[in-house]
Amino acid sequence: MLDTLSGGYENSIKTASDILRCGGIVAIPTETVYGLAASAYSDESIKKVFKAKGRPQDNPLIVHISDMEMLYEVAEDIPRKAIECANRFWAGPLTMVLKRSGKIAPSVSAGLDTVAVRMPSEKTARDIIKRSGLPLAAPSANTSGLPSPTSYTHVINDLNGKIDAIVLGNDCNVGVESTVISLVGKTPRLLRPGAVTLEQLREILPDIEVDKAVLSRPQEGVKVSSPGMKYKHYAPKTDTYLVEGVSQNFINFVNTKSDALAVCFCEESDKISIKKAVYGSQKDESTLAKNVFKVLRDADCFGVKEIYVHAPSKTGVGLAVYNRLIRAAAYKVIIL
Ligand code: TXA
Ligand code: MG
């Protein structure tokens, strides 16, 4: 295991880069979630990523770059709006879908003529990209369908023995995956909400549309703009419900349940008399984003029959948290 926590940083960056250059696959920390990286130029390496995760073949990967020069290696016909977004939000948790260049391995894009690109702000990730000289395709480093990994223990639990190495880092600061927007159609489109919020994006892309799949179940047989949105995601094994309503209603509702877990805000925790797990503060949605996947991963350990999660607002980064939770709940929403 490569360790960037207890010294040897330079060494671990070098080893990770060497493995990637030789066609291996390495889990790396990013500011959003841990990613499972492989050279975006090597079809063979990308196939190993799909295999280790058990990922459906038609779900394309995000390519990670360390500087603007690399953007022109991986994408073509880059619109001016994309450069404006890059100037404002990179390095950081924004992914842009653009026209792909011929250099990218076809399996990265899963047959599409586009490529999703982001420049992470996490230093470790950027240093590995720089050192290897490779754009890195990296989906979240979890088993497909499970909550994304926000600490290296999650990666080890899911992928130990299936990947060549993991670069150990701190827990991810953002906690939900990057915002994904498409800039290839006539109108910019939000495909997946994240820590770069819709409100912020509107300042540069006033006409941005929100894809239907952000808040509702994609219909059977209908083509979705982002293939990842059609898969069941993040779900605990225990039957999970998303509950909308003010705190007092949520408290009254869960307190009538006997064999259930309430996933709640810290402000209401004291008044809940059943098993509970706090996922952050109602007043600061970034705390909810940071903990939501950990709470979903731990939820099955409570041994209850049902899980009721108090829904955050759908504004700011709350929209990203809501988007992940509604999938975890298989779209079962209770409105109080
Ligand atoms: O924060 C993140 O984005 C993390 C870290 C590791 O960077 N990565 C991540 O990757 O979340 P993944 O594979 O778990 O999610 C990528 C999402 C999927 O929903 C996929 O369908 C979509 O991006 N995507 C990738 N390429 C696309 C493309 N060309 N067109 C539309 N959607 C695309
Ligand atoms: Mg993922």
Image (tube, rainbow, N blue to C red):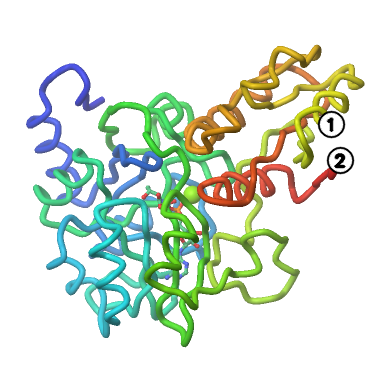
- Is 90 on the left-hand or right-hand side of 248? left
Q: Position of residue 70 (x, y in %)?
A: 16, 66
In the picture, the quarter occupied by the C terminus is top right
What amino acid type should be assigned to the residue bearing mark 1? Answer: Asn
Q: Residue furthest right?
A: 256
| Residue for point 40% across, 77% down | 183
Amino acid, disc 2: Leu
Pick whichever, 135 or 45, lies toward us: 135
Give the percent coordinates (x, y) of residue 36. Answer: 35, 45
Q: Quadrant of residue 296?
A: top right
Foreground of the two, 275 or 27: 275
Q: Quadrant of residue 151?
A: top left
Q: Does residue 310 sit above or below 178 in this rendering?
A: above
Residue hosting label 2: 336
Q: Residue at x 62, y 21 (%)?
A: 266
Upstream in the sequence, badge 2 or badge 1?
1
The correct choice, above or below, for 45 with respect to 102 in the image is: above
Q: Residue at x 28, y 28 (%)?
A: 169
Q: Are marks 2 and 1 in contact (CB under 8 Å)?
A: yes
Which residue does the numbered mark 1 point to in the structure image? 249
Look at 15% across and 60% down and name the residue there.
Answer: 67
Residue 100, position as x, y percentages in the image: 31, 77
Rendered location of residue 292, percent (x, y)? 56, 34
Label 2, label 1: how many angstroms apart (C-alpha)? 6 Å
How crowded pointer 2 is (Cα within 10 Å; few <14, some 14-19, many 20+) is rated as few
Secondary element at image label 2: loop
In the picture provided, is 46 more to the left or to the right than 238? left
